[in-house]
């Protein structure tokens, strides 16, 4: 059965798990995510990395799925990412209490005890990312870059409505598209199984999400 969530009201987010300073508001039939951290107060970490966050859907999905949602950047440079097929390492659930605590700090996800694929599809945090814009697919643990494609999404001031983002994972095949424009494919010789999905943002990006749909593939 497909999972459909408009993300339009607080009740739509019952059971969602926030890791890090997640700020959630609702507008325009969806949710607006932003960081609640005071970046000036976090300057001591050198990069503002403690201002970023991950927001997990509570459902566990099968291994073969199509995941899609409407996305619009609203303000600020930063990064938007989706984790998918996420579990704990060694076959543990993502929220198994034996896993190390997570607070939104990125190394906890890419080089800790989380097994996942993660696609970063709006990358504007650093000058090098703004100069040459790509969508990156990584596999963790290990932070391995396994696929890359062009990033067609505009900066917030140029965004024209929402963009439909889509990830398809079937067996060892993964594809990624925005508004039906396929940007990369990846064949995984050691494919991950089922797991959870989560939205990640890097501050200071504020972005709008709506109409999340996860469809099992047969």
Image (cartoon, helix red, strand yellow):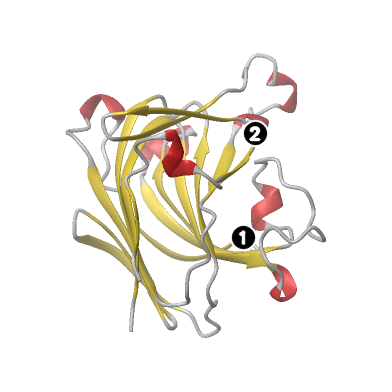
Residue visible at 38% across and 35% down in the picture: 9
Residue 89 as seen in the image, left or right of residue 139: right
Q: Is residue 172 above or below residue 86?
A: below
Q: Kindly give the residue lying farthest to the right in the view shown.
A: 98
Q: Left or right of 201: which side holds 206? A: left
- Residue 169 image offset from top left, x and y in percent: 39, 73
- Secondary structure category for the residue under label 1: loop
- Residue 35: quadrant of the picture: top right
Q: Is residue 139 something that shows in the picture? A: no
Q: Give percent across and percent down for residue 202.
A: 52, 36
Disc 2 target residue: 49
Give the vertical position of 15 relative to 185 (above or below): above
Badge 1 vs badge 2, beta-carbon distance below 8 Å: no
Task: State whether residue 70 is above or below residue 99.
Answer: above
Q: Is residue 13 left or right of residue 28?
A: right
Quarter of the rendering occupied by the N terminus: bottom left
Mark-to-mark CA distance, 1 and 2: 17 Å
Which residue appears at 69% of the width and 21% of the height?
42
Q: Quadrant of residue 218?
A: bottom left
Residue 182 visible at all? yes
The x, y position of residue 199, in whole percent, is 48, 47
Residue topped by disc 1:
143
- Callout 1: 10 Å neighbours few (<14), some, many (20+)? some
């Amino acid at each position: 059965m497909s999972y459909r969530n408009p993300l339009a009201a607080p009740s739509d987010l019952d059971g969602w798990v926030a890791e890090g300073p997640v700020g959630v508001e609702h507008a325009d039939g969806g949710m607006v995510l932003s960081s609640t951290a005071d970046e000036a107060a976090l300057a001591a970490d050198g990069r503002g990395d403690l201002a970023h966050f991950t927001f997990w859907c509570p459902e566990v999905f099968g291994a073969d799925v199509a995941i899609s949602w409407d996305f619009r950047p609203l303000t600020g440079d930063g990064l938007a990412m989706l984790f998918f097929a996420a579990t704990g390492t060694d076959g543990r659930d993502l929220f198994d209490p034996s896993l190390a605590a997570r607070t939104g700090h990125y190394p906890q996800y890419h080089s800790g005890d989380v097994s996942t694929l993660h696609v970063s599809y709006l990358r504007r945090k650093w000058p090098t990312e703004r100069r040459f814009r790509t969508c990156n697919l990584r596999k963790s643990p290990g932070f391995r870059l396994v696929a890359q494609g062009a990033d067609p999404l505009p900066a917030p001031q140029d965004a024209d409505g929402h963009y439909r983002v889509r990830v398809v994972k079937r067996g060892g095949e993964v594809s990624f598209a925005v508004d039906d424009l396929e940007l990369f494919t990846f064949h995984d010789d050691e494919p991950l199984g089922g797991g959870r999905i989560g939205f990640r943002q890097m501050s200071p990006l504020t972005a709008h999400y709506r109409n999340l749909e996860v469809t099992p593939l047969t």
